[in-house]
């Protein structure tokens, strides 16, 4: 040790890591509630600054001046991204963050392997723990990086349609098997992989990265947009696991703690999202979403013909004026139309007139976990007004009017009635139990599941066709006019 380590006991660095780990845990604990989430972010960020600063200065990787400059540049880039990226683009930004985390872990582990081989003089002197951890990092990190790039491209509309082909699962299995075999060769230095060894670990490690990168692409390209919330949560977990295994390669305890926390929370979130869709993770990764709709033999004409009733903002305002309880169901269409501010203004007007207003949030509404919550919070809608599916579903029968804006599959009753439906068994918002349902959509086009929604043809359903922001603003203007 040198530099900052001079004159300090060797335990100082570990104490700094321990404090950083405590800050990570405290920050994560506060992220569990919307009111304390911002403070939790600050606490976790403080822990990261402490961990990075202690590591860089202790090992004299950078001078304090260069470190401060690097932190300022990074903070400036982060601030610019946070203030300029549209809320509708947040899912792809989160996807890219996941990918960068996984890619960085894979590259750091590879660089450490090359460095340790150079120091030890021979690859056989490296411990199995280091080589095995590096292999796991390379596999998970590369899959995360390339899978996240594809996911971000899909969310941005560049690769919108799923790419499917016959025998795709066999191709994935063969690619995974090849990557595992190379990983085993990395650890055991098997002579049968002599051409790959070349006296060091670098060559098989980079072969492993190439195979894992291909696997990442193969895993995500067939997945449809409806499964993106699950994919984003899973890639977040993989990013954390890659960081944790990199900690074993570097013998860095704070990296192990931080990576484990991210990986565990990502896995828990993935399980929650899968349960919200009544699907297994295997089904999400290896099955076609919406493929059963054709087999069901139902198209929009059969469901909607002669049964759909359209309405106007004027008629909807008349209904709102006589309502005592209104539930608003936001969906991705509201995000695309940037209608959250008009929705919030409408909710404030109704509440000012003594009408109870609640927002019903489905766990997979939007394109990433918590997407709707973020949009509504941006419009200063109180967290107390946002209710999850399990809390709001029993109350629809006591609701006078439900206003669905931009949501589709999460309010589709086919989930309970159609065994052949691709969303069969998926918990949805039971909006049809309310006295009246107003659905705001541009058209009767299906959602991500690719199936018609019988709700639109329900006896108590009115369709308010049009752009979400224009329709919500029209409701606001009409409601104000009737009050004056």
Image (cartoon, helix red, strand yellow):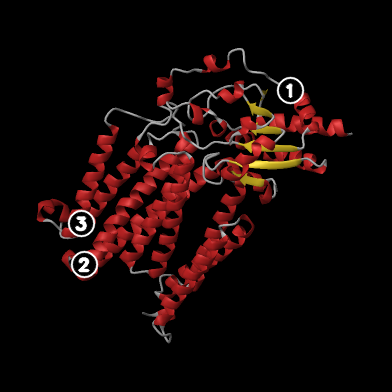
**341, 482: nearer the viewer:** 482
Which one is nearer the viewer's eye here, 110 or 65? 110
Q: Quadrant of residue 129?
A: bottom left
Residue 250, horizontal then vertical, whole percent: 33, 67
Residue 424 in the figure: left or right of residue 35 = left
Find numbered disc 2 in the image and state the secondary structure of the residue it sits on: loop
Q: Find disc 2 in the rendering and name its residue.
A: 126
Q: Residue at x 43, y 70 (%)?
A: 56
Q: Is residue 243 above or below residue 157?
A: below
Q: Earlier in the sequence, mark 1 or mark 2?
A: 2
Residue 40, above or below 355: below
Do we see residue 339 in this rendering?
no
Pointer 2 local density, CA inside 10 Å: few below 14, some 14–19, many at least 20: some
Label 1, secondary structure: give it: loop
Q: Would residue 218 be seen by someone viewing this image from the given angle?
A: yes
Picture residue at 54% right of the left edge, 36% below the top: 428
Residue 469 found in image quarter? top right
Answer with left or right where residue 141 lies relative to residue 321: left
**Residue 166 as seen in the image, left or right of residue 62:** left
Q: Which residue does the numbered mark 1 point to in the structure image?
A: 312
Image depth: mark 3 or mark 1 in front: 1
Pick whichever of labels 3 and 1 is earlier in the sequence. 3
- Image coordinates of residue 383 in percent, x first then y, are 66, 50
The furthest residue to the top: 306
Measured Cα–Cα span from mark 1 to mark 2: 72 Å
Camera-nearest residue between 482 and 147: 482
Badge 3 is on which residue?
186
How far separated are the C-alphas under marks 3 and 1? 67 Å
> Which residue is the extreme one toward the right?
484
Find residue 132 and report its image quarter. bottom left
């Amino acid at each position: 040790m040198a530099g900052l380590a001079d004159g300090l006991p060797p335990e100082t660095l570990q104490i700094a890591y321990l404090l950083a780990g405590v800050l990570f845990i405290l920050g994560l604990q506060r992220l569990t509630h919307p009111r304390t989430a911002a403070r939790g972010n600050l606490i976790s960020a403080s822990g990261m600054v402490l961990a990075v600063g202690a590591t860089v200065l202790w090992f004299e990787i950078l001078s304090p001046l260069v470190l401060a400059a690097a932190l300022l540049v990074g903070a400036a880039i982060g601030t610019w991204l946070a203030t300029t990226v549209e809320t509708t683009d947040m899912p792809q930004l989160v996807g890219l963050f996941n990918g960068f985390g996984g890619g960085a872990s894979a590259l750091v582990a590879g660089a450490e392997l090359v460095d340790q081989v150079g120091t030890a003089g021979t690859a056989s002197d490296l411990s199995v723990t280091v080589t095995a951890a590096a292999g796991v990092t390379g596999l998970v990190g590369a899959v995360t990086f390339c899978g996240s790039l594809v996911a971000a491209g899909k969310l941005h509309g560049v690769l919108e349609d799923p790419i499917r082909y016959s025998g795709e699962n066999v191709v994935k299995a063969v690619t995974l098997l090849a990557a595992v075999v190379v990983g085993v060769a990395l650890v055991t230095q098997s002579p049968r992989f002599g051409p790959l060894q070349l006296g060091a670990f670098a060559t098989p490690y980079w072969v492993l990265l190439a195979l894992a990168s291909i696997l990442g692409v193969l895993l995500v390209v067939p997945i449809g947009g409806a499964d993106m919330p699950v994919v984003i949560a899973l890639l977040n977990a993989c990013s954390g696991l890659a960081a944790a295994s990199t900690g074993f390669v570097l013998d860095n305890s704070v990296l192990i703690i931080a990576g484990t926390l991210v990986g565990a929370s990502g896995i828990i979130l993935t399980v929650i999202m899968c349960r919200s869709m009544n699907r297994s993770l295997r089904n999400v990764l290896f099955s076609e979403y919406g493929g059963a709709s054709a087999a069901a033999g139902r198209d929009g004409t059969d469901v909607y013909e002669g049964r759909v009733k359209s309405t106007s903002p004027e008629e909807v305002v008349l209904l709102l004026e006589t309502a005592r309880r209104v539930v608003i169901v936001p969906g991705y269409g509201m995000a695309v139309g940037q209608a959250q501010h008009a929705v919030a203004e409408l909710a404030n007007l109704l509440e000012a007139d003594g009408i109870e207003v609640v927002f019903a949030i489905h766990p997979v509404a939007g394109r990433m976990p918590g997407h709707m919550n973020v949009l509504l919070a941006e419009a200063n809608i109180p967290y107390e007004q946002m209710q999850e599916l399990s809390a709001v579903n029993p109350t629809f029968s006591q609701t006078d009017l439900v206003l669905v804006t931009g949501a589709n599959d999460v309010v589709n009753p086919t989930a309970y009635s159609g065994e052949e439906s691709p969303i069969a068994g998926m918990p949805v918002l039971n909006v049809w139990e309310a006295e009246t349902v107003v659905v705001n959509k541009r058209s009767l086009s299906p959602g991500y599941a690719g199936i018609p929604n019988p709700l639109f043809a329900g006896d108590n359903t009115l369709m308010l066709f049009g752009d979400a922001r224009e329709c919500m603003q029209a409701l606001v203007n009409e409601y104000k006019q009737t009050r004056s």
